[in-house]
Amino acid sequence: MRPLLLCSTLAIALVPVLRADRWTLDRAVATALEHSPDARVARARAEGAAALVDQSGAAWRPQVSVTGRYTDTNSPMMAFGSILNQRAFNFGLDFNHPGQIDNLNATGTVAYNLYSGGRPTAGRKAARAGAEAAELDLRTAQQQLSAEVVKATLNLRKAREAVGAVEGGVRAYEAAVQVARARFEAGQLLKADLLSLEVQLAQTRESLSSARRGAALAARAFQFVLGLDPTEAAIELAADDPVLTRLVVPETADFSPRPELRGLQARVRAAEAMVEASRGAQRPTVNAFASYQYDHGWKLARGADSWLAGVAVDMNVFDGGQTNSKIRQSSAELTQVKEMLRKATLGIGLEVEQARLAQADAAERLAVSARAVEQAEESASLSRARFEKEALLTADLIGVESRLLEARLRRMIASADERLAVVELRRALGLTPLP
């Protein structure tokens, strides 16, 4: 009894583990967002855009540099300059032949931009808008990927349910063949009718083989969307996924939260900032700077320090029309982005309407197919009873069974299509595919 009790205890303990390995929609979406190459590429782009924001902030920070070099020369100009920096000048020096002079120079410089015509401010605005657009692109990629995961999951369910429906047809024909064979052996049925049922059974088994191959391909597509390496292990889907019950038709028709639209709006702001940055090249640039240096030479055994500080103003008076050309270019790019936003708004509006009509059509087809299955099941039950009592022809039974199988497949496809239509409608509205 103890071994049996131990096995029972282990079996009960392993049930949650086995169930945890089953794929729910929440788990599949989370896995895809973590492992899919598309999600990783979008995250990398967002990180790159955030780095550009940090780069744009460098304009408000001082620039500090340190340089050092050692020279040894007999060039009169360079040697004379080194002598002066080392404070080693004397009036007995021959300017034409100062001799071989070495010099070790160490310089530290601090520079700070006081004014650049508004270009740093415009650049930071553009960078921030670009980073926002990249984040929205990431959200777009995540929503699209989530929708693809849900579609792949539902397609896998649909393929496996199709296998189940065809298996039911195979079992029905096998039962009919057994009854027909018994009647044939009793001399109550023609061999042609028995052969007709056997041919129909073979054709249904062929359809079952095709359905199983389709289910295997759907399983491989499921792994691909999730970014997982293909494996031969069976993919188990959760039988009662609570997410499926939460897939309801959204009440709103507002598609303004669509991340693609918000991303284009951010790009419009970035393009406007770039126009302002181009115009900033027509304004002066003011920089403050200060440096400290120390020079030492071993030939003269002297060394000294010095410093330099000041303000520099640069004004571009004429650059051959380069600045005006950049302004026209950035203005043209702004116009392009605005038109892209307008086109996207019109296109998404059409996409939402198409998704809404597709969902309504799918819901209606599901209701009609459900009623058709009920009628076909009742008709098949009555026809099987009549066939057993020799009150129904074989051809009529084949027709009834074929219609039942077709009705079940239609209902199964309509059910999956209705769920897919809801997912597509939510994606078109800019909502998360999973509530």
Image: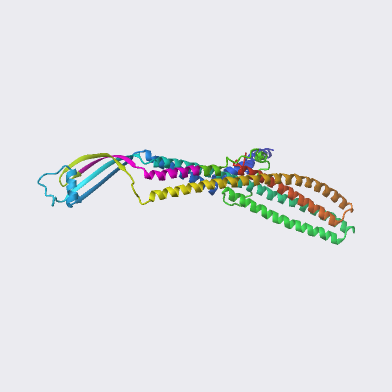
Q: Is residue 235 visible?
A: no
Name the residue at 76% across, 52% down: 406
Name the residue at 23% across, 39% down: 307
State the quadrant of the C terminus: top right
Q: Reply yes or no: does residue 143 show up in magenta.
A: no
Q: Reply yes or no: does residue 280 show up in magenta.
A: yes
Which colour assignment does the render follow? rainbow
Q: Is residue 182 above or below residue 83?
A: below
The range drawn in magenta is 266-295
Q: Is residue 359 left or right of residue 57?
A: right
Identify the residue at the far bottom of this view.
192
Q: Is residue 407 visible?
A: yes
Camera-side residue of 244 and 367: 367
Camera-side residue of 236 and 91: 91
State the quadrant of the N terminus: top right
Tell me residue 265's x, y (percent): 52, 42
Q: Is residue 264 above or below residue 180?
A: above
Identify the residue at the far left of this view.
92
Camera-side residue of 42 and 95: 95
